[in-house]
Image (tube, rainbow, N blue to C red):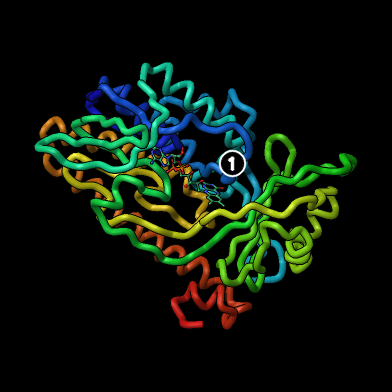
Amino acid sequence: MARAGLVIAGTGLAGMAAAITAAQAGVEVRLLGPPPAAGDRVGDTLSAAGSAALAALGMEDLLVEGPHRPHLVTHAAWGLPVLAQRHAAAQPEGGGHILQRAAFEAALFWRVRALGVAVQPARAVAMAREGARWRVALDTGGEMEADGVIDATGRAAALARGHSRHFRADRLVAAWQFIARSDHEVEPSRASLIEAVEGGWWYGCLLPDERLSLAFFSDPDLLPRGLSRDLARWRALTDETVFIRRWLESASFDLVAPPRLASAATTWLAPAAGPGWAAAGDAACAFDPLSSHGMATALWTGRRAALALIAAGNGEKQALAAYAGEMAGAVTDFLLQRERVYGAERRWREAPFWKRRRGAAD
Ligand SMILES: Cc1cc2nc3c(=O)[nH]c(=O)nc-3n(C[C@H](O)[C@H](O)[C@H](O)COP(=O)(O)OP(=O)(O)OC[C@H]3O[C@@H](n4cnc5c(N)ncnc54)[C@H](O)[C@@H]3O)c2cc1C
């Protein structure tokens, strides 16, 4: 059986941040999971906090070297039927970046490998405590032994769920797609766009490769049935918007396929850590993408989880409890902020989507 100081399950941003932190600290680390896949990956807006988290890993140059671009302006029709502008120059935290996500994850993965981290493309299926160590079972039938384990398997929380409680605040789902232009005469806006509608809200941003990343966030029972196979219904949904529709039409972004669906619910584990283990990223807390903080949270918590496990291994008894406490505090703060932001949209107070976010019954 292979042994490691730290086993990290999950090759997303949280797992990679944890692996980088552990390797930089000289800890023997093994990273489990498939290499980041090429192809379209939803979630493209890295907040300013995300850039700071990358800097803490010593990896901020990736934002300059890659195809990514600065994100400065957001227009939002939220609470009122007009667009309000938010410019990064007026924000104390500054601007973020619009990522070509697959390229970004691939570049970070190369950095992980360059640090000498052993990567095994197996999936972790369970972990069990044995004395002071952990045994991690793999889908290949093999096992690994480690002093500490980080679950960074995303929303699945494949390892930590068996050792903690899983909570869910809602069932938010995203219908999303990347859209090419049929005519390149009109230059599309580089500002991101948020538009609230009766059944949820839309987010659009121009990717560095000039495609439009478009997503509609709603609840599963409020979306038309079979939407992921029904282009006509997808078009009909965009027709119900004002600003998104105008953007699609003016810059010739043609809808030629139905969207894909992905869970975007707010979920978390409590506690997010215990003796010899910690959860990081979406496995610990997956926030509604309205926050635009998922990637930043993944990078910060990946790093924090690795540091807490290393400190615990060095005899700092409270390190993991402190990490779990920080995560619980972050969830409480987020839930309050979520209520405030959704509460600011009062035009459809009686519509199910908005009512549910005030905690009222349908
Ligand atoms: C529609 C949508 C839009 C979003 N938009 C944004 C945005 O604009 N900005 C932003 O900051 N965030 C956004 N997010 C959130 C953001 O994408 C996530 O918070 C972030 O990807 C979390 O990273 P992670 O590493 O924790 O998890 P993931 O990215 O899910 O990575 C988990 C990894 O674990 C691997 N894995 C899974 N199971 C196992 C297993 N059993 N064993 C080993 N490996 C396993 C997976 O293959 C994957 O590589 C969005 C999310 C959604 C759904």
Q: Position of residue 268 (x, y in %)?
A: 36, 56
Q: Secondary structure at mark 1?
A: loop
Left or right: residue 203 compared with residue 7: right
Please tell me in which quadrant of the rendered image residue 31 appears: top left
246, above or below 179, in the image: below
Task: Look at the image and tell me whether residue 204 can be seen.
Answer: no
Pointer 1 residue: 41
Residue sitting at x 35%, y 43%? 280
Please tell me in which quadrant of the rendered image residue 117 appears: top left
Q: Position of residue 83 (x, y in %)?
A: 70, 62
Q: Ligand 1 closer than 8 Å to the CB at disc 1? A: yes
The amino acid at mark 1 is Arg
Q: Quadrant of the N terminus?
A: top left
Residue sitting at x 48%, y 43%? 295
Q: Position of residue 128 (x, y in %)?
A: 20, 42
Q: Position of residue 210 (x, y in %)?
A: 74, 38
Residue sitting at x 39%, y 63%? 168
Q: Give neighbour class at mark 1: few <14, some 14-19, many 20+ (Cα, 10 Å).
A: some
Residue sitting at x 14%, y 44%? 318
